[in-house]
Image: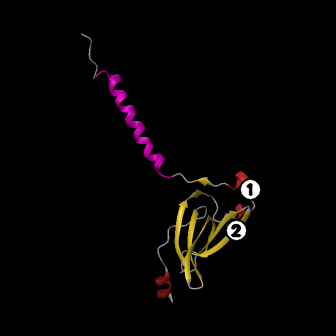
Amino acid sequence: MDQFNKSQITKVPDIRPGDAIKVHQKIKEGNKERIQIFEGIVIARKHGKGISATITVRKVVEGVGVEKVFPVYLPSVAKIEVMRSAKVRKSKLYYLRTAKGKKARLKKKEFAVAIADEPAETQVVEPADAESSGEAKETPG
C-alpha cells in the first residue's frame, strides 16, 4: 500500500494558507478534454503532506464566495501555480468568509530583496569617508 501511495505522489510546489494560486484542472466533456483554471486564495490545508492531502481554495465571483476543495495529488489536477504569498498567522483562514473590505486583505510576504539593498547603501558611504580624511585632495598652486 505504501509503495502505491509513493508512486502516485507528483511534484507539487509548497502550498501554504494565504497563497494566491491557480489550479489547472482537466475536465472531460463527452469525448473532449479541456483545462479549467480556478484562481483563488488557499484558506486551509488538511490531511498532512501525504497522498490524501487537500487544499481549500476560495475566490469571490460577482459578490458570491466560491470555495473548492482540491485533493493535491488528484490525477485530474494538471498543475498548481503559486502566484503570490501572504504573511498569515493562522493555519486556517476561515475568518475570510465573513471579512469585508480592508479586513479581508492579507499582508504581502517580504522576501530577501530588502536585505540585498543594504550593502549598496554602505558602499556609497565608504568613498565619502576617504574624501574627508584628506588623502586624495590636491592643494591649489
**Residue range corresponding to the magenta coloring:** 111-135
How many marks the image carries: the answer is: 2
Q: Position of residue 12 (x, y in %)?
A: 49, 71
User: Is residue 86 placed above or below 69 in the rendered structure?
Assistant: above
Q: Counting other residues with Cα less than 10 Å from the Cα at mark 1, is it few (<14), some (14-19), or many (20 or more)?
A: few
The residue under label 2 is 66
Q: Position of residue 32 (x, y in %)?
A: 56, 82
Amino acid carrying label 2: it is Val
Is residue 123 within the magenta segment?
yes
Q: Position of residue 115 (x, y in %)?
A: 46, 46
**Labels 1 and 2: the sequence-earlier one:** 2
Would you identify the image quadrant in which residue 141 lies? top left
Q: Position of residue 118 (x, y in %)?
A: 44, 41
The residue under label 1 is 100
Asked whether 11 or 61 is in front, the reply is 61
Q: CA distance from mark 1 to mark 2?
A: 15 Å
Q: Residue furthest left?
A: 141
For image coordinates 33% across by 23% down, the residue present is 133
Q: Residue furthest front?
A: 31
Q: Is 125 on the left-hand or right-hand side of 46?
A: left
For image coordinates 58% across by 76% down, the residue present is 53
Indicate which label's residue lies in the foreground, 1 or 2.
2
User: Is residue 112 placed above or below 18 in the rendered structure?
Assistant: above
Q: Counting other residues with Cα less than 10 Å from the Cα at mark 2, is it few (<14), some (14-19), or many (20 or more)?
A: few
Amino acid carrying label 1: it is Lys
Secondary structure state at the residue bearing disc 2: strand
Would you identify the image quadrant in which residue 20 lies? bottom right
Kindly report the secondary structure that dominates the magenta region of the rendered protein: helix
Would you identify the image quadrant in which residue 130 lies? top left
Asked whether 67 or 115 is in front, the reply is 67
